[in-house]
Image: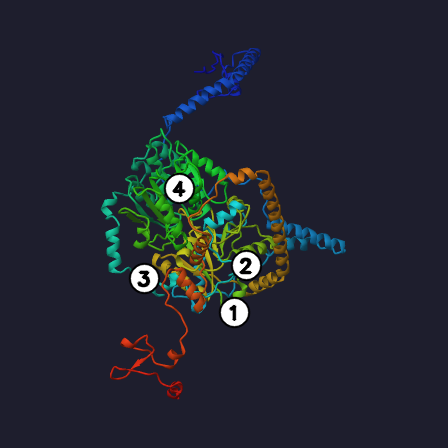
Amino acid sequence: MSKRARPDDLDFIGTIDSDAELSVEEEEEEIASSDSEVEQSEVEEEQASVIKKGKKAAAQKPKKAKQLKAKVEKAKEQDIDPEFEFDNGQATGLGVDEGGMEGWGFSGAGLREGRRDVNIDDIVKKRRKLDLKEESEDGIEKDEEEEEEEFKGFGSESEDDGEGEGFGEGVPEGMQEEDEEEEELPNLDSEEEDEDEEQEDDENDEEDAGSDDESVASVVEHPHDLKGSDDEEEEETAEEKARQEAYFAPAEESAGSVTASFQDMNLSRPILKGLNAVGFTNPTAIQAKTIPVALLGKDIVGGAVTGSGKTAAFIVPILERLLYRPKKVPTSRVLVLTPTRELAMQCYNVGIKLAAFTDIRFCLCVGGLSLKAQEAELRTRPDVIIATPGRFIDHVRNSIAFTTDNIEIMVMDEADRMLEDGFADELNEIVEACPVGRQTMLFSATMTSDIDQLIRLSLNRPVKLQVDQKKATAAGLTQEFIRIRPQREHLRPAMLLALCTHYFKRRVLIFFRSKVYAHKMRIIFALSGLKAAELHGNLSQEQRIQALEGFKDGKADFLLATDLASRGIDIKGIDVVINYEAPQSHEIYLHRVGRTARAGRIGRSVTLAGEADRKVVKAAVKAAETQKMKVGSRTLDNDLVDKLGAKIAGMEDEIEEVMKDEREEKLLRQAEMEIRRGENVMKYEDEIKSRPARTWFTNEKGKKDAKEKSAAVLNPKAEKKLSNKQLKKKRTADGEDMPRAYKKTKVERTTKPARGKAAGTGKTKNAKGGARAPKPKDSYISTRR
């Protein structure tokens, strides 16, 4: 133990021990202030002595640092600091303190370094510079104010609301509200001032189902719309209720009682310390119900509104159970499946933070990241694997020394999406590869109760934990709708631009059905001087991560995304969600608007709704009325919208030029990649040929069909009437028996069908039952007359 310097004892040795409380300089000040009777010369003499001894101690720092490191490692082995105290303060919001953990964040390895992607902003800047250079050569000089305004875009327009695009008469009952009610809505505008593997990944992982050729909402019947009537939700039949009662475990078997604190759940201290480190104080409703049941090893089907903490609800019991695992032989015991790469990365980040004070290891297996790095990590047998279905199956079939024989817990986040037809083949393959005696947990904000779908997962008397009513939204959400009349459908881009330049200027998430149109609007935003990023399936994984991180850090004010970002993504502080087109079903709408108003905060959603979107709007309004939520209609100034529409129309040539430059740059970089690939093939030919060929459980046609099925759920297209030839081909592919098709003979065309024993003889029967010869050729014509 180091000695403390005192006025009468100046024998101080400077070390880096944890017991030392004062630095050398602080000790000097204490000496000088406490010993006022000592002569100044003596004080200086003692100070020199202290400095000399401090230098001597500094020379011993490496040795002391090594001793300190040993002490820290020993403390880690004991799992807990004996002086640690838990924060028992009152929780804010939904169990997370202000400034606590953000759900999104990715710091994992595996990103391809040195990759250069095409950047729209760079292309626009380059074109701007070229235009300015040409104008200067022609002797054209622009006023500085005009130049600044040109780069700035449309942000200087008037912000007055006017009449025009409100819903008016045709709005479903309950949507017409007075302007006075608009003032009561929460004001969110106050902050306005302030490659090879890639090709396989795109085929194996279904993440973005936006259409490439639909740019505006069209009248398309959706399977969800065809299930029930427009006015009443489909009610479960008595037979279905009886099946559910027989399938799910009774409520008393769940043994889960709502607790007021994480400490009441008998969790281990390392887990409690991790929860406290990320700002979790009290459990949310879904966490309080799920954690005790999950610790019992029961199968769970859980549902709660978006932003209610479902990720922590299954991560916490997993960590608690893994603390008591056998550690002599490492093995992978937990599998977490998600439908998108971004959601998998988010779950990985949450798990790493909550397990910071344990020795539990996580592994991330998603497309777009280095396959070799993931294989190397899987060889170490991490405790928890978080993956997308396609990449996980790829590792199961092709990675050496990786097995699923010891999987004890399987979790499916956004399980209703995973149970759709697009993931059916992958899901069946994974379920067959995992042990039957595992614990299975399913979670989603729109969790299905379809027994036929759940039976596929071999659940064992699952406990149904439905915290909130079905199709519910967060309590702090305000929903607004802007009606677009048919004759003004072409002004959707102008309406979106008006919203982003006059009302919602930062922290805005905008959803599109089409990847192509999301990209086009990204170019329009760049030409308008708005800081935006895009997120959809046509981007590389590096670009997708960069877009999310840039939006989270405030480098981009707008994130233009497809339904790839509609599920599970948690970005703190999203103020507004705008639907450029209403989604095709109410379930997808709930996931979209659930990106705001999370964890007890307030938020606002704005939907541009045309005539084709009436069913979804009506369902959203009815659900909001049931919950007594705030719903309103917003109006835009017609003159402003027309003016912006004219400016966007004037940009068409420049938009085409930017897209042309982008295509050329992509082709150039693709050519460079092909050259490098050819060089590598020539250089490492023997090694490449010695590798075993990678296998997949279906052929290319099967992968293509699964991708189309998944895309049809999010953005279905109107089905065209099939020709007889196409119908025959479809039935043959589906395994249906086709009747033999042949042309009628001349006899069959001129006679009536044979019946009875004479059938197939080419003869017909008379009234007495005897066979008779067919009529002459002209008899058929005479009867027709």
The numbered mark, 2 or 1, whose residue comes first in the sequence reads 1
Question: Dot 3, how many residues are within 10 Å of its Cα: few (below 14), some (14-19), or many (20+)?
Answer: few
CA distance for labels 4 and 3 = 36 Å
Secondary structure beneath label 2: helix
Q: Which label's residue is closer to the chain start, 3 or 2?
A: 3
User: x and y percent of residue 182 in the render?
Assistant: 45, 59
Residues marked 2 and 1 touching at CB (< 8 Å) = no
Q: Please give left or right for residue 781 compared with residue 38 in the image.
A: left
What amino acid is at disc 2? Ala
Task: Name the N-terminal-most of marks 4 and 3.
Answer: 4
Q: Which residue position is annotated with label 4?
A: 96
Select label 1 or label 3 by which is in front. 3
Q: Name the residue under label 2.
A: 498
Residue 170, given in percent of the width and then of the height, sits at 43, 69
Q: Are marks 4 and 3 in contact (CB under 8 Å)?
A: no
- Foreground: disc 2 or disc 1: 1
Q: In the depicted view, which residue is nearer to us: 364 or 350?
A: 364
Q: Name the residue under label 3.
A: 234
Q: Is residue 531 left or right of 356 when viewed as pictured? A: right
Label 1: element kind: helix
Q: Could you tell me how far apart the alpha carbons at marks 3 and 2 are, in whole angstroms? A: 38 Å
Q: Is residue 322 above or below residue 541?
A: above
Residue situated in front as seen by the camera: 208 or 777: 777
Disc 4 from disc 1: Cα separation? 47 Å
